[in-house]
Image (spheres, rainbow, N blue to C red):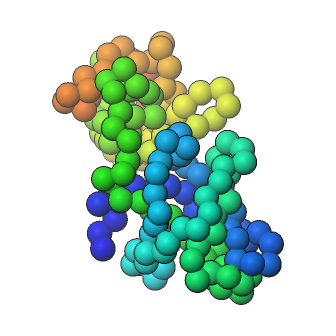
Amino acid sequence: MNTEDYFHLGAVTKTRGLKGELQVFITFDEPEKLKFTNLFIELAGKLVPYFVTLFKIPQKNIAYLQLEDIDTIEKAALLVKKDIYLPNKIKPKKKKSDFGLKDLLNFIAVDVNEGELGEIIEIHEFPQQLVATVPYKNCEVLFPLNESIIKSIDVVKGVVLIDLPEGLLDVYLD
């Protein structure tokens, strides 16, 4: 199974109780909108299917998960620190009005002064703001995603026009 046909839901963080329940850190926005009876866990580089008997979200980014045939803490312990995936076909479709800054992942960042910097390969979420990572001239350049930096976004072409503060690139390149 190829991970391109799946999206990342989260990762198992630890076992919970003695009957094989798992605690999961959810990375997907709005997991409560997802409806699924099975999921896939990455084991030894392959996606292994499991049937879900319980999935509840007690707080933001945390879920409790019970899988069929995982009924002891020993079986559950083997799944700790493993990534969880769901098929792309159950991923809710976003409306254009729902576009957010996190959706800039894989967009091409173009600076008004420097030109094309490269593809946004990662977006870090900090309490104050989101920060994008772009590989540029053999360095990873980090820059904030906010109104003063972003000048325009072309969703169709997958391009974000930015105006980096003077000297920011020099910090990484010197």
Q: Is residue 35 depicted above or below 93 in this figure?
A: below
Which quadrant of the view contains residue 124? top right
Q: Relative to 156, is 129 on the left or the right?
A: right
- As rendered, which of 98 and 17 lies closer to the eye? 17
Q: Is residue 45 depicted above or below 10 in this figure?
A: below
Is residue 110 visible in this depiction of the protein?
no
How many numbered discs sit on the rendered protein? 0
- As rendered, which of 78 and 20 lies closer to the eye? 20
Residue 121 in percent (x, y) is at: 39, 46
The residue located at (72%, 48%) in the rendering is: 58
The residue located at (47%, 48%) in the rendering is: 34
Q: Relative to 14, is 121 on the left or the right?
A: left
Which quadrant of the view contains residue 133? top left
- As rendered, which of 118 and 6 lies closer to the eye? 6
The residue located at (48%, 79%) in the rendering is: 43
Image quadrant containing the N terminus: bottom left
Residue 104 in percent (x, y) is at: 38, 33
Residue 173 in percent (x, y) is at: 44, 39
The residue located at (58%, 83%) in the rendering is: 69
Q: Is residue 61 depicted above or below 5 in this figure?
A: above
